[in-house]
Image (tube, rainbow, N blue to C red):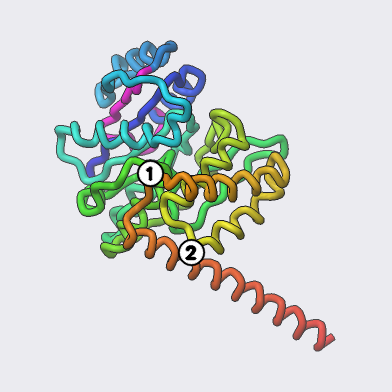
Amino acid sequence: MRLVVSVGFLNEERYLPAFLETVAAQTRLPDRLLLVDDGSTDSSPEIVAEFAAAHEWASVMTRPPRPPERDRLAQAHEYQAFLWAAERIEEPHDVVAKMDADLRLNPHLVEAVMAAFEAEPRLGIAGGPLSIETPAGLQRERSPADHVRGPNKFYRRACLDEILPVPAIAGWEAIDEAKAHMRGWQTRTVELPGGDTVHLRPTGAHDGRVRGFRRMGSNAWSYGAHPLAVALGGVSRVRERPPVLAGVAFVWGWAYAALKRYPRADPDVRAVVRREQLARIRGYFGRRAESASAANASDSAT
């Protein structure tokens, strides 16, 4: 299977050297690496140009300039850059991956994900788990097992062709998976030998954690999260930094997006998202009830 990896970047001079080093260290190299400059004004273009000159399988692409915006992440420009590059791939390929430049890749990432595609014909979207560095060591970023984080998302080409168009709006990384599920494709995170890929800039750290949590809530509105899932998501985040405010910002982001009527996924996609969320919630509380029942039975026996 042939793999093309697209990496969109905007002023990533701080992270690109580590990212590119770990791309070159993969146990299975991509067949083509597209380094997509989305309007950088720092030294990022020079960094990627030097890398491409030294690696024949890498090339640089430059997107047309666009005006600055208050919140570029809310407009999913990173996904727009991926779609823009994917439309311009000329060579035959079986898998296309979207990666962010603020990652330190596990050296087995590409090999493990491509092996999963080879072994599972109905696997449509896959990727590796992400962890962040904390004073206590690496901590995995939260994500259901059947969800693939946007910073390292691999698409089987046949799946991507079926689910497009995916709207380039906040919440796109849940919308694409719902559309894949609707067409019978599977999605999952692939465990990697030797540890997770490291997200050097944790989700929400680009422009403040509170704004990041608020954006997550806005994303939930866009992909059609069930209100119960939103409420539980807010509760589950109250212990994250900043305490309490993180959960409040998440719920407020969802409510504000609803009030402002932000763009949303199609109704059939939202229905799939809600159905899957409710199934996870029922499963979670069902397991907790079973554990409590087993603990009570054990106490009674003693």
Q: Position of residue 126 (x, y in %)?
A: 37, 50
Residue 125 visible here: yes
State left or right for residue 175 relative to residue 12: left
The CA span between labels 2 and 1 is: 21 Å
What SS does tag 2 mark? Answer: helix
Residue farthest toward the right in the current orientation of the protein? 302
* Above-or-below relation of 222 to 96: below
Q: Circle 2 sits on which residue?
A: 277
Amino acid beneath label 1? Lys
**Residue ID at (61%, 35%):** 209
* Above-or-below relation of 212 to 280: above
**Residue ID at (30%, 18%):** 65
Residue farthest toward the bottom in the current orientation of the protein? 301
Amino acid beneath label 2? Gln
- Looking at marks 2 and 1 on the same chain, the residue that comes earlier in the sequence is marked by 1
Kindly identify which numbered label has been placed on residue 98: none
Read off the magenta span: 24-39
**Residue ID at (62%, 37%):** 210
Nearer to us in this view, 158 or 223: 223
Q: Circle 1 sits on which residue?
A: 153
